[in-house]
Image (cartoon, rainbow, N blue to C red):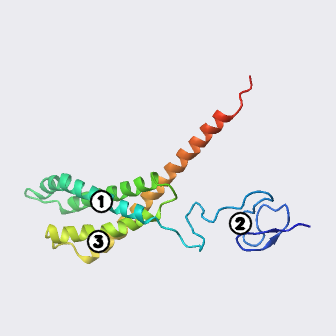
Amino acid sequence: MVQNKCAKCGAENAAGAARCVKCGAELVAAGAPAPSQESMYGFDAMNKPSISWPAAGLGAAIIIGLQAVVGLALVPFLSSAMLGGRSPNMVGFWSAMILLAAAVYFAAGFVLGRYSKGYLVREPFLAALVAAPANWLLEHFVYRNRGVSTAMLVASAVLCLGIAYLGGMAGEQVQQKERERKRAAAAARKAPTGA
């Protein structure tokens, strides 16, 4: 009886088995090409996740650039609208600032996830990891804002890291659906018409 060896764990399986009895991994049928070492999730031959550093750098540049543009365009308006007058609304101002930052980080993660070649969800996370301290330093030293504490930096960085990661995942989902739609359209064009 011919045994089918699992590529993941090395266990011997029956010839017609679809999944490994030990680890549950999908088995390659006889005659089918072996799966590539680099899977959709981007693991290299040493089983370490491969990271696209240019994509992470591009994401950091997108985040910092978008925050600079949004900051220069909207922060003076929000500041005069919510902090001016007799009763300044600090909670409303900082809530609006957090929502703006969340939108920027999500948009940057989404753009990276949507237009990337591979499965990039770690890169928006790394971009946010670089951009959050850069934004804090910019606000602290350029704008001379002494009210920003280290605890605020950590809390906002964690929030922005998660939001950028979610943006990357959403972008990847849109990219996957687009690929499936293109595959279905290509298969429909190749299908013989029964006339």
Residue 193 position by quadrant: top right
Between the C-alphas of marks 3 and 2, the distance is 41 Å
Query: Where does the C terminus fall, quadrant-wise?
Result: top right
Give the side of residue 193 with respect to residue 169, left or right.
right
Q: Are marks 3 and 2 in contact (CB under 8 Å)?
A: no
Which amino acid does the dot numbered 2 rest on?
Ala
Closer to the camera: disc 1 or disc 2? 2
To which residue does mark 1 refer? 101
* Of residues 132 and 54, the one drawn nearer to the viewer in this rendering: 54
Q: Residue at 57%, 41% (x, y): give it.
A: 182
* Direction top: furthest residue: 195
Residue 124 seen in this snapshot = no
Residue drawn 81% across and 72% down? Answer: 12
Can residue 8 be seen at all in this image of the molecule?
yes
Which badge, 3 or 2, is on the more N-terminal residue?
A: 2
Q: Position of residue 40 (x, y in %)?
A: 58, 60
- Residue 152 position within the rendered picture, expressed as x and y whole percent measured from the top left: 27, 72
Disc with the residue nearer the chain's start (1 vs 3)? 1
Q: CA distance from mark 1 to mark 3?
A: 13 Å
Comes first in the chain, label 1 or label 2: 2
Q: Is residue 195 above or below residue 3?
A: above
Q: Decide: few, some or many residues near mark 3? Use Cα within 10 Å; few <14, some 14-19, many ≥20.
A: some
Circle 1 packing at 10 Å, graded few (<14), some (14-19), many (20+), is many
Within the image, what quadrant is residue 10 found in? bottom right
Q: Mark 1: which amino acid?
A: Ala
Q: Callout 2 environment at 10 Å: few (<14), some (14 to 19), or many (20+)?
A: some
In the image, residue 158 sits, relative to residue 64, either above or below, namely: below
Name the residue: 19% across, 52% down.
73
**Which of labels 1 and 3 is toward the front?**
3
- Taking the spot 13% from the left edge, 70% from the top edge, the residue there is 144
Total numbered labels placed on residues in the image: 3
